[in-house]
Amino acid sequence: MINDFPGLECLEDTAKALLMGAAQQAVVPPGTVVFTSGTSCENYFLVTDGSVRVQMVSENGREIVLYRVESGQTCIMTTSCLMSNALYGAEAITESEVKAVMVPAATFQKLVDSSPVWRTFVFSSYSTRLADLLMLVDEVAFHRIDVRLAKFLLERGGVDGQLVTTHQDLASELGSAREVISRQLKEFEKRGWLKLQRGRIELLQQNALGALCD
């Protein structure tokens, strides 16, 4: 369990015993809501396999994906809630079957208080994820949506240039409105850069999309 997380290999013996004695392993099916906005945090999650999507949903239903927690990672939202005794401000949903280690809140706090190695691991993970969030804010606030969309399509299109996704999913990923994404996709299709199908996008001219990004 510990070996799945770089930084915990040198965990002190007393801290390791405390962690192993209290932590529980969990297997969570895909599509499970792990936490929702306004709920309290009871466990520190360390994901060993799978992917959890953390997102915010506005009152009018607009979504934005903040980040994903994948193998060997932890959740900045959970860390923040445990450290400040606050409620969750977002929601998390498993995108695949997820295997995770759950550390009870009380044990998490004891480890923070007593273990320098654990403290370093927690705050290092927190700072890395915070940097990712700042990059997201920069992208949403200051970068053109056509460039961001082209970049996202190229990153997710793979070698064959095929994406199984919806306009709403893309809007959530990019922090935009579905109408804006649909309009931009239709413009790309008009230029012959891609082909739109129900629930699928085929990239036809990846070089042209790449030139837009550049």
Image (cartoon, rainbow, N blue to C red):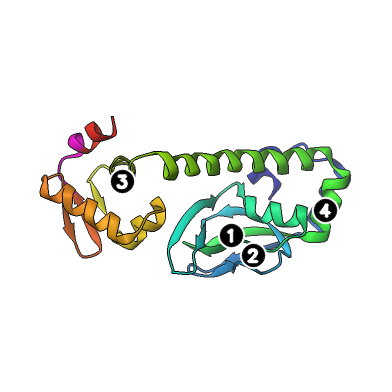
| Helix, strand or loop under label 4 | helix
**Amino acid marked by disc 3:** Leu
| Helix, strand or loop under label 1 | strand
Real-space CA distance between mark 1 and mark 4, rounded to the nearest whole angstrom: 23 Å
Query: In this picture, is 60 found above or below 126?
Result: below
Earlier residue among tags 4 and 2: 2
| Helix, strand or loop under label 3 | helix
Percent x, y of residue 96? 47, 62
Label 1 or label 4, whichever lies nearer to me, is 4
Q: Is residue 176 left or right of residue 195?
A: right
How crowded pointer 1 is (Cα within 10 Å; few <14, some 14-19, many 20+) is rated as: many
Earlier residue among tags 1 and 4: 1
Residue position marked by numbered label 4 in the rendering: 109
Earlier residue among tags 4 and 3: 4
Q: Is residue 146 left or right of residue 49?
A: left
Real-space CA distance between mark 4 and mark 3, rounded to the nearest whole angstrom: 41 Å
How crowded pointer 2 is (Cα within 10 Å; few <14, some 14-19, many 20+) is rated as: some
Real-space CA distance between mark 1 and mark 2, rounded to the nearest whole angstrom: 6 Å
Mark 1 vs 2: CB contact within 8 A: yes
How crowded pointer 4 is (Cα within 10 Å; few <14, some 14-19, many 20+) is rated as: some
- The circle drawn on residue 99 is 1
**Amino acid marked by disc 1:** Lys
Earlier residue among tags 3 and 2: 2
- The circle drawn on residue 83 is none
Q: Is 59 one of the magenta-colored residues?
A: no
Residue position marked by numbered label 2 in the rendering: 26
Mark 4 vs 3: CB contact within 8 A: no
